Image (cartoon, rainbow, N blue to C red):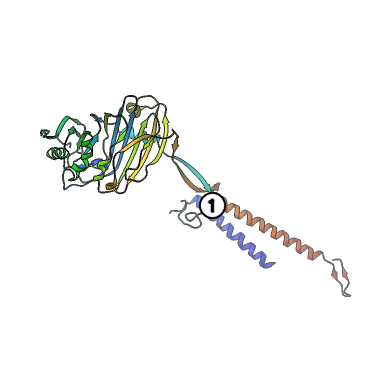
Amino acid sequence: MRGTHRLLKRLLTMLGALLALQLGSLVAPAYACGCGAMVTDRMDRIGVDRETSAVHWDARTGTERIVMRFTVHGDAEKAAWVMPVPHRADVALGDPALFEQLDGLTAPERRTRDYFWPRNRDWPFSSDGDGASAGAMPGAGPGVGVGVVGRERLGPFDVARLTATDPTALGDWLHRNGFELSDRLAGELRPYVDLKWEYVAVRLAPEKAGEPLYGALDPLRITFANDRPVYPMRLSRLATTPQSLGLYVLSDHRMEPKDAIGGADPEVLFAGAVDRPDGALAELTGPGRVFLTAVDQSFPRPALISGDHELVRAAADTPYREVIWKDRLWRVGGVPVWLLTVTGTVLLLAAAGLAVARTRRRGRQDRPRPDASGVRSAA
């Protein structure tokens, strides 16, 4: 019995120390593009980390609007890209607040769930606790096979709207007008020339001379007639590093890319109706109800991109919002429930053991004791 008492005493002492240590920690916590962004100087380097666009498709009027924003890095002071469009386009500056608004509308829902037993990063397994602006484009003539529809200065952007019947002539015109483009551009433009598409050529530079282009650039809004929504991606084949595309699609119904066009499978991050658009979103879509779908896609090998994204109506307007779970150790009053449970269980077992020991001791004391003649007598 003495051994049992010692064991129970040690267990109680150890649990008391653990509980005190845990309670003490409450007072003193432990420390523990694709799209063709191209530099204008071959000695400079620029990369498109992220291409984010909002596409609004108005089926009633046959109008498509694309608001594009790029997040870039590198040491280039000037850059340019070419955007093919199926019909004559109007170009204007976009509102940066649009993407902040869309980010807010499509933000994942964050939920918390508790777990009982401690994990690798929880105490006592871990001691870390709980876890200047560029000048306008040179005025060179269009040349054979290229037509200049218009040219505008929009903030830091010089925008030329072009037609072309010969991809080589289009490439030559861009070179003569300050665009340093990939040698493979003419071949990639051939499908658009065959389809008689037009082009928006954009050249940009930071507001202060000598500063490299870095971070999120001002968005551009491109509007054109179209009988079906499409997001041009073919020129992304020219990119030499993996690309990432974030696409917000706004229409009467839930929309989705028809296929992966050579990238990873598009992932829907959000789908839901916006009943009363306001602010920058209402300026883009109008004040009426619109269905918003957010799609994310990566292109680990841009050379495999096979065409443009054709956006089609989904089978149903099923709403969806991404849920991000945060797991946390279940606590009551700051103390892990598992520790309270184990402590309580041991205390109960200890109390039961002591009760059994007392009962046995009393039983021995109550037994008749033999006298000198060997006859038992009551104590």
Residue drawn at 69 percent across, 60 percent down: 353
Q: Which quarter of the figure is the N terminus placed in? A: bottom right
Is residue 47 visible in the rendered structure shown here? Answer: no
Above or below, 113 relative to 146: below
180 to 225, vertically: above or below? below
156 left or right of 65?
left
Of residues 269 and 123, the one nearer the viewer is: 269
Left or right side of 65 for 147? left
- Depicted 89 relative to depicted 257: above or below: above
Residue 302 in percent (x, y) is at 28, 46
**In the rendered image, which quarter is residue 47 located in?**
top left
Q: Residues within 10 Å of mark 1 (few under 14, many from 20)?
A: some
* Residue 44 coordinates in the image, percent (x, y): 18, 47
- Given the image, on which type of amino acid does mark 1 rest? Leu
Asked where in the image residue 190 lies, by quadrant, the reply is top left
Element assignment for label 1: helix
Residue 355 lies in quadrant = bottom right
Q: Which residue is mark 1?
A: 23
User: Which of these two is toward me, 184 or 196?
Assistant: 196
